[in-house]
Structure formats: structure tokens, C-alpha cells
Amino acid sequence: MKAERIAEISTIVFAIAILVFLGALSFQYLGAITHGSYIPSNETPIPIKVIAKQYVWEFIYPNGTVSYDKVVIQAGKPYVFELTSADVIHAFYIVQLGMKMQAIPGYTYDLYIMVNQPGVYNIWCAEFCGPGHYTMKGIMVVTNSTG
């Protein structure tokens, strides 16, 4: 009976240790993407406004150019996506990078990003935002930094 009690307590302590470790890693990762701590301090991120609307992603570049459902960035350069919503709660989710940030009306959240691998990355809304939610898809095209 005493051995069973020791095994039970050991299992609980081990589970708590694993959860604390995973929580600390998650907290560190969240801090990195929301504060851009992984971006070199000598580089200033390029701001791109992202406005979520039922059922489209609107991207506004620093020069005023607007695009819908497609954002183009260069590999190896830091960016900050300034996320907000024009109507309901959305979630900006870059599938292949595993990066997700809420877009809430009246609030702006910064998502720091630097992608080193050129390619096409899917953007989905990961928050049910209405009957057309399934159509709210976009792409992020990452081009070579040399042109």
C-alpha cells in the first residue's frame, strides 16, 4: 500500500514538472513573437498593417499600397504585422510557421516575423468569425531578399 502511494505521488510530481517546463517554453516563445526578441537589434522591422474583415485579410504596406488576401515580404528581413479587426474577433494564423495572433476590434497587436525560407505560406482565420469563415484564407509570399 505504501509503495502504491509513493508511485502515485511520484507520478503527480513528474506530471507537474513536465507541465511547468512546457509552460516556461511556451511563455518564452510567446514573448519572442509578441516582442520580436529574436530579431537582430540593429534592424528595424518593416510595419505592415493587417486588418481582418469578414471574410478577407487586408494588408497595408508602409507606402500605402493595399492588397487583399496576399502579402509579399522578403526573406531575411524583419517585419511587424500590426493586427486589428474591423468587425468581429479573428485569428491570424500562418499555418506552416505555427504563428497565430488574435485580431480584435478596437485593439492592435504586433506580430513580429522574419522568415528566412522563400516560399508560399498559408494564412487562415483560426477563429470562427461567421458563416463565411471557411473562405477567409490568404497567402504570404516570401521572395528572395536579392530580388
Image (cartoon, rainbow, N blue to C red):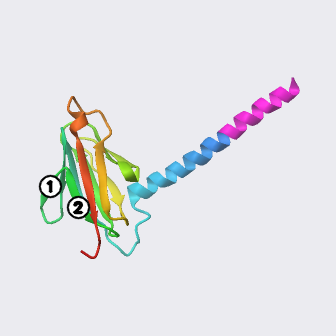
- Which amino acid type is marked by label 2? Val
Q: Residue furthest left?
A: 65
**Percent x, y of residue 54:** 18, 38
Dot 1 corresponds to which residue? 67
- Which amino acid type is marked by label 1? Ser
- As helix, strand or loop, the secondary structure at mark 2 comes to strand
**Which corner quadrant holds the C terminus?**
bottom left
4 is higher (above) or lower (below) than 86: above
- As helix, strand or loop, the secondary structure at mark 1 comes to strand
| Main SS, magenta residues | helix
| Between 73 and 3, the one nearer to me in the picture | 73
Q: Residue 124 occupies which quadrant of the picture?
A: top left
| Between 143 and 104, the one nearer to me in the picture | 143
**Circles 2 and 1: CB distance less than 8 Å?**
yes
Q: Which residues are magenta?
A: 1-15
117 is higher (above) or lower (below) than 121: below
**Which corner quadrant holds the N terminus?**
top right
| Between 120 and 8, the one nearer to me in the picture | 120
Count of labels shown? Answer: 2
141 is higher (above) or lower (below) than 109: below
**Percent x, y of residue 38:** 44, 64
Q: Is residue 51 left or right of residue 124?
A: left
At 35% from the left and 60% from the top, the residue drawn is: 113
72 is higher (above) or lower (below) than 98: below
Lower sequence index among marks 2 and 1 = 1
Q: Is residue 83 left or right of residue 15?
A: left
At 31% from the left and 36% from the top, the residue drawn is: 127
